[in-house]
Image (spheres, rainbow, N blue to C red):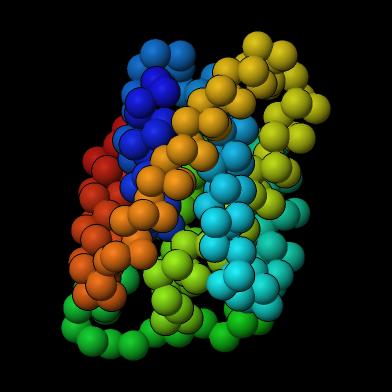
Amino acid sequence: LLFISWLAATISGIAGFGGSLIILPVFSFFIGAKKAIPILTIAWMMGNFSRAGFGYKEIKWKPVGYFCLGALPAAILGSRVFVELPAGIIMRAIGIFLLAIVALRHLNIKYSLSEKWFIPWGALVGFLSAVLGSAGPIGAVAFLSLNLAPTAYVASEAVTAVVMHLTKTIVYGRYSLLTAQDIVTGVILGLAMVAGSWTSRRFIKNMSGKVFGYFVDTLLVVAAVSLFISK
């Protein structure tokens, strides 16, 4: 589990998302999905905090602030009801949406979000993150529209993830979804994710913009397919 945590954080540190594609199925198999999501929330919070810290000088605070304005209350709401909603339909809809985004990128059709649109977009991502365990690809779409340098994009997106994961951790604790043992487990796995964030930083510094784009698009397609076929 430590190795999987490191690998997932490395992938997320390069693309800004994608680690959940590896880690959620594995952790759900070993400890169950309902237990995995709260524990991983702690670990992801630590991993994202380290990603933001490694690239803090390049963070774009204005869009991050708008995004968090919407994400924080939505994450609270989603955390309270995440086991009640029929996630299957939502996941398939997101999958179709992500495939459409990849198509737009490769057809050279430009899309962009004004910074104020980051508030409702953040609300959508915050809610889905709490309901589904992760909504990284949806959040990535917003920050990709800003055409940031890879390091700035990863660090900025990581800040929003920290806010959402911290919010979810507090709510999960409030509703007894986290035990003391779960918190210790999450922290230990989080340390592996910090190491993964450091590893990804070494890769992304030497990665060309073109290779980075292909890597992100590949993960978006994988995320879409996995969401669409999941049950």
Residue 193 in view (yes/no): yes
In this view, the residue in front, 55 or 129, is 55
The image quadrant of residue 52 is: bottom right
Horizontal arrangement in the rendering, residue 148 relative to residue 42 (left or right): left
Residue in front for this viewpoint, 55 or 102: 55
Percent coordinates x, y for residue 176 in the rendering: 74, 19
Task: List x then y, in percent, for residue 145.
Answer: 44, 79
Q: Which residue is drawn at 58% across and 18% down?
A: 185
Depth check, front residue: 93 or 55: 55
How many numbered discs, if any? 0
Tell whether 197 sits left or right of 172: left
Q: Residue at x 38, y 46 (%)?
A: 199
Q: Residue at x 72, y 54 (%)?
A: 72
Q: Please provide percent x and percent y for residue 206.
A: 29, 65
| Quadrant hosting residue 179 | top right
Q: Residue at x 36, y 64 (%)?
A: 205
| Picture quadrant of residue 168 | top right
**In the orientation shown, which residue stands out farthest toward the right?**
174
Q: Quadrant of the C terminus?
A: top left
Where residue 50 appears, x then y in whole percent?
Answer: 57, 48
